[in-house]
Image: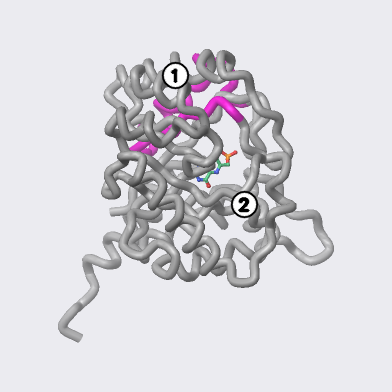
Amino acid sequence: MTLVMGIVNVTPDSFSDGGRWASADAAIEQGLRLARQGADIIDVGGESTRPGAAPVDRAEEHARVVPVVEALTAEGLTVSIDTMWASTAQAAVAAGASLVNDVSGGLADPVMASTVADAGCDFVAMHWRAPSALMDARDSYVDVVAEVRDELAARLDALTAAGIDAQRIILDPGLGFSKVGESNWPLLANIGAWAGDARVLIGASRKRFLGAAIAVPGLAHPEPEGRDHATTAVTTLCADRGVWGVRVHDAQAAADAIAVVSAWQNAFDTEE
Ligand code: PMM
């Protein structure tokens, strides 16, 4: 069954929930709440990746995430660390994280791949072309599915060459990252074409392209929290297509959608 990865951004400035869980106590409470609502994994991040976001000092990033990772793993939860930086990944793994979620797929920090190989943990390699400040300008594709497939395949080669076991790598198309609007949809509609047999993580939750899809003509696009139903529709389709995991803000809605897909699939009559 598709896993639910619940998001805890320990940041003052994330696009979708900026500032709400900026203190360690609030972030820990949010992680526990997401787990009660059905999240299988809690994804803890200390640096916003919103378009145009400024980088965060490493010491500040560590200080934000390590206490949260420690507290949530002490409660028996499975925790992933959302970082592009090897030292933060290392500190979080030492604090109990069992998965490293790198939106740059190992491109931002040259020692990320070897650090993860040494840690022996799972690694989410997301499709990424440029740092947040520059990423929207890199939304230029002739064939987005083929280009994401090839760029992820190149990452897979580099990551395995650095010693990460291929089975440990989960691929993510990086929705919203150098994909401003329409480029996101072909990646959702053709997952097998870029992912092959790899495990896939989809992070559509509350992103701009969903706001654009559900916008009513003549009115402003819905704000991030107004995109939760659209997110759940994506989760439902992902669960039906056997996606490994969805990264979401609303864990309850995702868990419910996945349970419905599972019940539906279990009732499917293969005799017909
Ligand atoms: N999106 C964001 C942050 N981290 N990680 C993965 N693997 N995939 C994503 O799509 C992704 C991510 C940005 O969204 P947020 O600000 O709501 O966390």
Count the marks: 2
Residue depicted at 24% across the width and 73% down the height: 268
Q: Secondary structure at mark 1?
A: helix
Say which amino acid is labelled 2. Gly
Circle 1 Cα neighbour tier, 10 Å, few/some/many (<14 / 14–19 / ≥20): many
Residue depicted at 62% across the width and 37% down the height: 49
- For disc 2, does the CB lie below 8 Å from ligand 1? yes
Which mark identifies residue 176? 2
Task: Name the one closer to the observer, 187 or 218.
Answer: 187
Q: Which residues are magenta?
A: 20-47
Q: Earlier in the sequence, mark 2 or mark 1?
A: 1
Q: Residue furthest bottom?
A: 272
Q: Which residue is mark 1?
A: 68
Circle 2 Cα neighbour tier, 10 Å, few/some/many (<14 / 14–19 / ≥20): many
Is 118 displayed left or right of 237 in the figure?
left
Residue 41 in view: yes
Which mark identifies residue 181? none
Q: CA distance from mark 2 to mark 1?
A: 26 Å
Query: Closer to the observer: label 2 or label 1?
Result: 2
Task: Name the one closer to the observer, 164 or 64.
Answer: 164
Up/down of 188 relative to 102, above or below = below
Say which amino acid is labelled 1. Val
